Amino acid sequence: MGGACHSGAVEFQEVVRRRRMVRQYADRPVAPASLDRLLTNATRGPSAGFSQGTELLALDDPDDVALFWTATGAASGTHNVWLDGMRTAPVVVVPLADESAYRRRYAEPDKARDTDAEWPVPYWLVDTAMAALLILQTAVDEGLGACFFGIPAEHVDSFLAAFGVPSHLVPIGAITLGHRVADAGSPGSPDRRERRTDVIHHGRWAGPGLRDLGHVGE
Ligand SMILES: Cc1cc2nc3c(=O)[nH]c(=O)nc-3n(C[C@H](O)[C@H](O)[C@H](O)COP(=O)(O)O)c2cc1C
């Protein structure tokens, strides 16, 4: 933000630095204005062709949050450290990708692409993931914690049915949100793995390429 920090907000570099997945939450609701800001910011992300094929399901009623957990496979009697921590979240947001929005958009005259041609990568998933990151970053700026996690493939249909979501939408995962507590829940993989420092390649690939590894031409 380069010094133009608005009052009360965390400086941008701090948002990036502080963001981490939070898997345990305080028994305190998320203010409706904070939830509104999280969701609205998610709609400010980029989208290929401005297709805007991202939908957001926000659950902040305790019954709905409980239904989310049962519909995604956590039977009421199931307990583990991860689930017990995650179930303390007062809010769950599910970002959903709509491939059909891209197929429609890219058939319009200013795009008019071969509608059978595949995208280099599924842009609807790319864009929906970008929206999810905006939620995670806004949570930090709101002084909240958040965790992005996957919905097990075998429970996607029951999740869609439980909330009346059209079956062509793909939930790319889900995000728990809430106020933070001193971490007592599952710490996650960074506890067991180092952050990689060798991922940035300036100009040319530094380190072994595929050819060096003998994967090409064999
Ligand atoms: C696509 C994706 C799926 C993830 N799935 C889970 C999950 O199922 N459970 C979980 O606790 N964390 C999940 N995470 C969070 C990662 O474990 C976490 O981002 C990673 O360990 C780095 O930690 P940090 O985000 O706290 O820096 C997921 C993250 C992404 C991007």
Image (cartoon, rainbow, N blue to C red):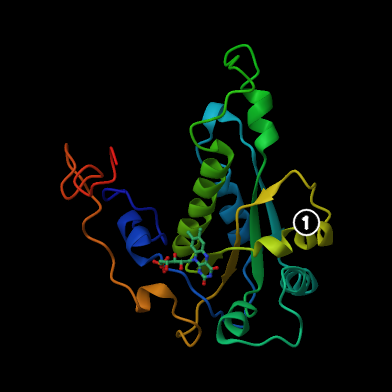
Residue 218, relative to residue 142: is it above or below? above
Q: In the image as oriented, which residue stretches furthest toward the front?
A: 218
Beta carbon of the mark 1 residue lies under 8 A of ligand 1: no
- Which residue lies at the image location 36% right of the left edge and 78% below the top edge? 191
Picture quadrant where residue 154 is located: bottom right
Q: Which residue is mark 1?
A: 160
Q: Quadrant of residue 194?
A: bottom left
Element under disc 1:
helix
Percent position (x, y) of residue 117?
58, 23
Question: Residue at 51% of width from left, 84% of height from top?
Answer: 185
**Left or right for 6, reference 41:** left
Amino acid residing under circle 1: Leu
Residue 102 at x, y percent in the picture: 63, 30
Vertical order, 53 against 6 (above or below): above
Query: 185 or 41, which is in the foreground?
Result: 185
The location of residue 151, given as percent across then percent down, is: 64, 63
Residue at the (80%, 73%) spot, across then down = 63
Q: Nearer the viewer, residue 28 or 121?
A: 121
Q: Nearer the viewer, residue 77 or 43?
A: 77
Tell me if mark 1 has few (under 14), some (14-19) or many (20+) residues whose alpha carbon lies within 10 angstroms of its own: some
Which image quarter holds the C terminus? top left
